[in-house]
Structure formats: structure tokens, C-alpha cells
Image (cartoon, helix red, strand yellow):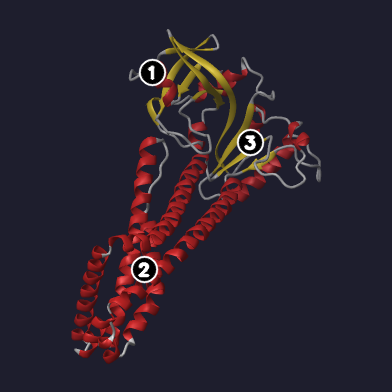
Amino acid sequence: MLADAKILLTQIIESTLFAFEALRQNKIRTFLSTLGVTIGIFCIIAVLTIVDSLERNVQNSVESLGKDVIFIDKWPWTFSGDYKWWKYMNRPNPRLSELKKVELQSQFAGASTINIQLGGVTVKYESTTAEGAQVTGVSHDYNKVRSFELKEGRFFTEAETVNGTDVVVLGYAIAQNLFGNRRGSDRLISIRGRKFKVVGVVEKEGESLMGNSLDNVLLIPAKTLANYVRIDSDRANAQIQVKAAPGVPLEQLEEELRGIMRAQRKLKPGEEENFALNKTTLIAEPLKDLFSVITFAGWIIGGFAMLVGGFGIANIMFVSVKERTNQIGIQKSLGAKNYFILIEFLVEAIVLCITGGGIGIACVGAITYAVSALIDFDMMLTVGNIFTGIIVSVCIGIISGFIPAWQAARLDPVDAIRAK
């Protein structure tokens, strides 16, 4: 048994070397025959890599919002076919008083905060300005609901939130624009002519596909923002964010919040709600379906290219069998078994496909490296996708090379030696 295995392994090695020699001697023919496989594998692996990278980046962006967080909003994140936008427009914004009710009455909340956004603000420090910043008013538990790291300084205290103190936590990009590499904490900056003390700077987060990066955001206490902006106006995009306590199912927290908000807004039983309870699964699930469709489309496009490539490989293998018919006859007359001939040509077909597939995978790897280096987007060719490309290449080699190899293995040695 062991001897047979050694013979088979030796044969596979010899067949592989012979296949590479055939590739070397027929470079143009090899290139043309493997081009279809290269394009097919490139299409499939490129689509898989793009979809995986997009899905990973979107997932990271969604998780940064909080997968265990309920968002009490004016607008729902998903709409049905009978979407009536005027109803949502007339809904009131979440208020600070409602946040207090949630904090007092909720038994399943681990932390809660209000989030009020006001865009297009110019920030000044001495003679330096940073334009287009987003001011976000939050409460002191914001750092417990939304996960982020501080590069320096600290976050707001409860007293600063309650008293509406003029303090600010800067996003990384704003701090870089205003202070460069200098420390920003304890400096005074001007927001719309009002002085704020910088108490902290957020660590760099980079671009986010969901648009929720804090790099270009100014975090100030919500009560401070309420001193000079009407936070219940349509200009202020307000929401209450409630994080579930450890071990509490999100559905249980959602039902509790629904009851609290209905009571706070004095809604009668059966009366339509004038608020929305959103969660990240409302975003994640449709995106998974979208990514599945894109992946399927990639397999279809790549499948057509590989179909052409498979025919090309089969054609070159038939030509190879024809050219080496005399040699096959000599091998069989010297005692070569049918399976030996079958394996020899099958390995050659697989090597051809792996060569084409390898080139396709290498092209995808080069493109992903270039994209990651040139733009702020995490794109990576994974080991799983490389393995997928190799397996598909091997399968195409087996399918396209089996009939020519089987035909070669069944040749009569006498007729094969006489062939010209």
C-alpha cells in the first residue's frame, strides 16, 4: 500500500514537471488558453474581495453605532411601500425631558444619551480655522453608549452636562487642523463667537461608510447646545440612544422604551406612535441581501469567462494528446498503466488552470494593495478567497481536462506508436 502511494506521488510530481515543461515550450498557446481562466478567477475573486471588504467596513461602521443600542428617532430607518413622509415630518423631535424619563424609568437600560447634530460650523483657534465641522450635543453617558477612544484629555463630567458648561471634546481631524501636533487639551477655541474649553481629543477613527466617524465632530454638552440653538427645531437632528444593560435582550429593551415613550407623549391605546425605535439590524439585514446579490452577479460574470477558459483548456489538451500520441504508445508498451496516462494529462490541465488562476489572484492582490495604499479604505485579499480561487481553478482543470486525459489513457499502444 505504501509502495503504491509512493509510486503515485512520484508520478504526480513527474507529471507536474512535464506539464511545466510543456507550458515553457508553448508560451503563446499557454497564455491564450489560460487567459479565460485568468479573467474568470479575477472576476470572481475581485468581486468576493470587494464584497468582503465592503461588508467588513460596513459591519465595523454599524457596530460602532452600537449593536445593542436602541435609537429613539423622529424618522424610521426603513420605510414600507405606503411611505407617508409628511406624517414623519410632523413628528416632534426627542427632547432632553424624555431622556430624563428614560433614565428614571427604564430598568433594562445600561446607559442612555441624547445626540443632537448641527452641521456646517466654523471653529477658530487664534488665527487658525477649521470649516465644515459638525457640532454634536450629547450627555455625559455618551462615551458609554458610543464606543471610541480618547487621544488625550477626558470626557464630560455629569456636572458639566447638567450645568451646560462651555466645554468641548474635539474630533481628531479638527484638532489636527487647529493645533497640529500640539496638545489641544485646556486650550480655548471659538464656536460661533462663543469660547469653549477643550477637555479632550478623540483618537483618529478614519472614514466611515455609514458617515458616523467622529474625526470632524465637536462634542459639547447637550444643555450647552440648547442655550443658543432650539434643539426641538427641524434644524437639529436629535435622537435618544439607549444601550441595553448586560444580559438584556434588545427586544426586551425595545418594548420597555415603547411603553415609556407612549406614556411620555400621552398616546392612547391603539393610537399611532409619533416616534421610531431603530436598531442597527434594520441596516445590516438589507445590506447582507445586497451583498449576496452582488456576489452572485460576480459568480455569473466569472462563470462565463471560466466557461470560455475551460473550453480553451480542453482544446489545448486535445491538441496535446494528438501531438504526443506516439509517446503515449511507447509509454504503454513499456508497461505504463491507463491511470498513469490519465493522471499525467489531468495534472497538466490542472497546472494550466492553477497558473491562470494564480495570475488572476495575483492581479486582485496587487489591486487591493494599491487601493488600500492610495485611499482610506480597508481592502484586503483574504486567505479564504485565495483558497476559493485555487479550488475553483483545480475544479475547472479536472472538468476540462478529464475527457482528453481519458481519451489518451484508452489509446491502443500499437495504434498509438504507428500514429504520425
Q: Nearer the viewer's eye, disc 1 or disc 2? A: 2
Query: What amino acid does circle 1 point to?
Result: Gly
Q: Which residue is mark 1?
A: 184
Q: Which residue is mark 2?
A: 394
Query: What amino acid does circle 3 point to?
Result: Val
Query: What amino acid does circle 2 point to?
Result: Val
Task: Give the secondary structure at mark 1.
Answer: loop
Number of other residues with Cα within 10 Å of mark 3, as a class: few under 14, some 14 to 19, many 20 or more = many
Give the image location of residue 403, x and y in percent.
40, 79
- On screen, 32 above or below 273? below
CA–CA distance in space, label 1 to label 2: 58 Å
Give the residue displayed 48% in from the left and 25% down from the top: 216
Give the image location of residue 80, x and y in percent.
72, 47
Give the residue displayed 81% in from the left and 42% down from the top: 271
Number of other residues with Cα within 10 Å of mark 2, as a class: few under 14, some 14 to 19, many 20 or more = many
Sequence order check, earlier mark of 2 and 3: 3
- On screen, 418 above or below 28? below
Q: Which mark is residue 102?
A: 3
Give the residue displayed 54% in from the left and 9% down from the top: 193
Give the image location of residue 300, x and y in percent.
52, 60
Task: Give the secondary structure at mark 3.
Answer: helix
Task: Please say whether residue 165 is visible from this viewpoint.
Answer: no
CA–CA distance in space, label 3 to label 1: 34 Å
CA–CA distance in space, label 2 to label 3: 59 Å
Task: Please say whether residue 270 is visible from this viewpoint.
Answer: yes
Sequence order check, earlier mark of 1 and 2: 1
Q: Of residues 215 and 115, which is closer to you in this image?
A: 215
Disc 2 and disc 3 in contact, CB within 8 angstroms:
no
